[in-house]
Image (cartoon, grey):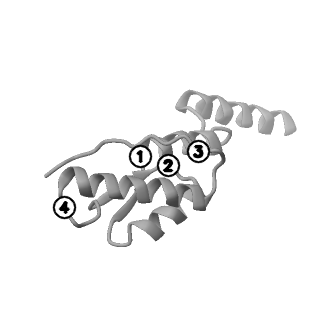
Amino acid sequence: MSIITEKVSFLDFVSAENFKWALNNFNNFIRIYNEIERSPDVIITDEDPALIAAVETVFLSSDHQICSWHKSVNFKKHFASILISPKNAINDNENAREQEKQKK
């Protein structure tokens, strides 16, 4: 069993066609290097739509997963404004009670 942790390609621009070219070359490399005639069992990428489309085209039998680090970063980026710490939640609750008292 072999594990190849990464593949780096420098592309002129991000497109599904460029990613397909890079992934086909990667696929050829691992088949020659590992002397196997099958695709990797798992491919892990970021959430780039063009890359996802290329992976699904080139590695038909591989399980495609999104990197958990990228998921975490994107979750924090998109939901940071609504995430609050427990301390802030307590303060917000106390402020709301004070405002209710002042209304009465």
Q: What's the mark number on residue 68?
A: 1
Identity of the residue drawn at 57% across and 44% down: 74
47 shown above or below 8: below
For the residues marked 2 and 3, what is the alpha-carbon distance in whole angstroms? 16 Å
Q: Say what amino acid the circle numbered 4 marks.
A: Ile
Which residue occupies the foreground of this view, 89 or 61?
Answer: 61
User: 85 left or right of 32?
Assistant: right
Q: What's the mark number on residue 30?
A: none
Helix, strand or loop under label 4: loop
The answer to the question of whether label 2 and label 3 lie on touching residues, with beta carbons closer than 8 A, is: no
For the residues marked 4 and 2, what is the alpha-carbon distance in whole angstroms? 26 Å
Picture coordinates of residue 44 (x, y %)? 39, 52
User: 15 left or right of 63?
Assistant: right
Q: Say what amino acid the circle numbered 2 marks.
A: Asp
Picture coordinates of residue 31 (x, y %)? 26, 58
Q: Residue furthest left?
A: 1
Identity of the residue drawn at 75% across and 31% down: 98
Q: What's the mark number on residue 11?
A: 3
91 shown above or below 6: above
Q: State which quadrant residue 97 falls in.
A: top right
Q: Residue furthest front?
A: 32
